[in-house]
Image (spheres, rainbow, N blue to C red):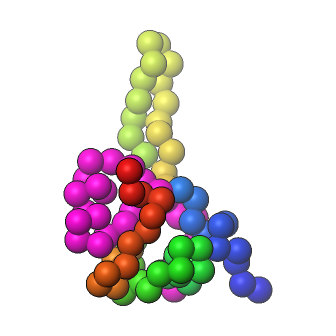
């Protein structure tokens, strides 16, 4: 059973670092924790109609945080940095 592409790709990651990487055709997304590189590639190609050259993934670990006297942790999540073919762009990131 194939996963729905919108279940694999959760949201784009919008940071200064990810915007700098867009100059090199690298786009950053939060993805499902159980998604592998092949599923991520297929989901990006299906949603945005672009050609993916490379997918790098990493698990972002939680950090300890505190609000007043309440201690807790941020959530863990999976990040995917997707390199697109030369000349391809994803319009959702364009300002």
Residue 2 in which image quadrant: bottom right
Q: In this view, does 53 lie above or below 8?
A: below
Q: Is 24 situated left or right of 79 in this image?
A: left
Question: In the image, what residue occupies the spot 44% across and 12% down?
Answer: 68
Q: Quadrant of the N terminus?
A: bottom right
Q: Is residue 64 or residue 87 the one in the foreground? A: 87
Count up the numbered dots: 0
Give me the residue at 47% from left, 24% from top: 71
Q: What residue occupies the far right of the structure in this picture?
A: 1
Q: Give the range drawn in magenta.
A: 12-40
Quick check: can you spot residue 54? no
Identified at 42% across, 84% down, the residue is: 52
Q: Which residue lies furthest to the top in this view?
A: 68
Residue 81 located left or right of residue 29: left
Q: Residue 63: x, y in percent? A: 38, 40
Residue 75: percent from left, percent from top: 51, 45
Q: Identify whether 16 is placed above or below 2.
A: above
Query: Where is residue 9 drawn, in percent x and y?
Result: 57, 66
């Amino acid at each position: 059973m194939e996963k729905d592409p919108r279940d694999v790709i959760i949201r784009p990651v919008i940071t200064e670092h990810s915007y700098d990487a867009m100059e090199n055709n690298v786009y950053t997304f939060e993805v499902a924790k159980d998604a592998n590189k092949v599923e991520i590639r297929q989901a990006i190609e299906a949603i945005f109609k672009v050609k993916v050259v490379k997918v790098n993934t990493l698990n972002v670990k939680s950090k300890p945080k505190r609000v007043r006297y309440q201690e807790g942790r941020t959530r863990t999540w999976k990040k995917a940095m997707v390199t697109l073919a030369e000349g391809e762009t994803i319009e959702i990131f364009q300002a």
